[in-house]
Amino acid sequence: KKVILADGIAAYATPVFNDANSGEIISFFLAWQGVLAYTFQLYFDFSGYSDMAVGIARLFGVRLPINFNSPYKARNISEFWRRWHITLSRFLRDYIYISLGGNKKGKTRRYINLFLTMLLGGLWHGAGWTFFIWGALHGFYLIIYHAWSRVRSSYLGFIPTDRLPEFYIARIVTFLAVVIGWVFFRAESLDSAILILEGMIGLNGFELP
């Protein structure tokens, strides 16, 4: 995962983000190449060395918990965080979200607690605006998901949640939301992140790389 997949994929991601950091215009296909490559580079890198830690610990008789569980298969952003960096997710839940009151103080307070928890999770990765926006974005994602879940259970509860079209649409929407977040996580500045996002939505043309 780490040496072959992550390091191999990095060759398709790093130049795109470096170009954006230099202020170069990023076209549609190049932007998606770089962002999707980074999406899988980050997973294989992070998951790979987490697996190494679990395996090395076993050699000394220590059993560490798994840290990744196919996160890109998640059907919603809440499930994504139950699958991605599981140990950090548990820490944020137990020591920040629950400490703030969790869902015990009403719907509005729950949304605020979710947002603050993810905001602090973003800042934990680095003290910069890109990490601030990444955390805030995931906070908004969670608020939207929980609000939608309430609406769906109240008004659309008669529709099965495991129907095939909705199952795959939910996965695609969740994956795209995560991918957009990774742009801010990887970019070195807000300007470079905006350049890549502009490329992803086709504002900079469709030239083949």
Image (spheres, helix red, strand yellow):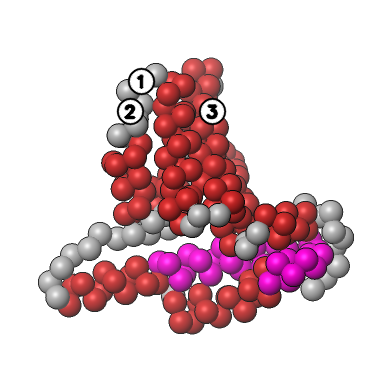
User: Is most of the magenta stretch helix, strand or loop?
Assistant: helix
- What residue sits 80% from the left and 68% below the top? 24
- Residue 180 position, x and y percent, is 63, 52
Would you say residue 29 sits in the magenta stretch? yes
Disc 3 residue type?
Answer: Trp
The residue under label 1 is 105
- Residue 153 position, x and y percent, is 47, 22
Image height of 190 relative to 166, above or below: below
Which secondary structure lies at badge 3?
helix
- Residue 129 position, x and y percent, is 59, 51
2 and 1 marks in contact (CB < 8 Å): yes
- What residue sits 17% from the left and 77% below the top? 59
Q: Which residues are magenta?
A: 18-47
- Alpha carbons under labels 2 and 3: distance apart: 21 Å
- Alpha carbons under labels 2 and 1: distance apart: 6 Å
Which callout, 3 or 1, points to the residue nearer the camera? Answer: 1
Disc 1 residue type?
Answer: Lys
Of pointers 3 and 1, the one earlier in the residue sequence: 1
The residue under label 3 is 148
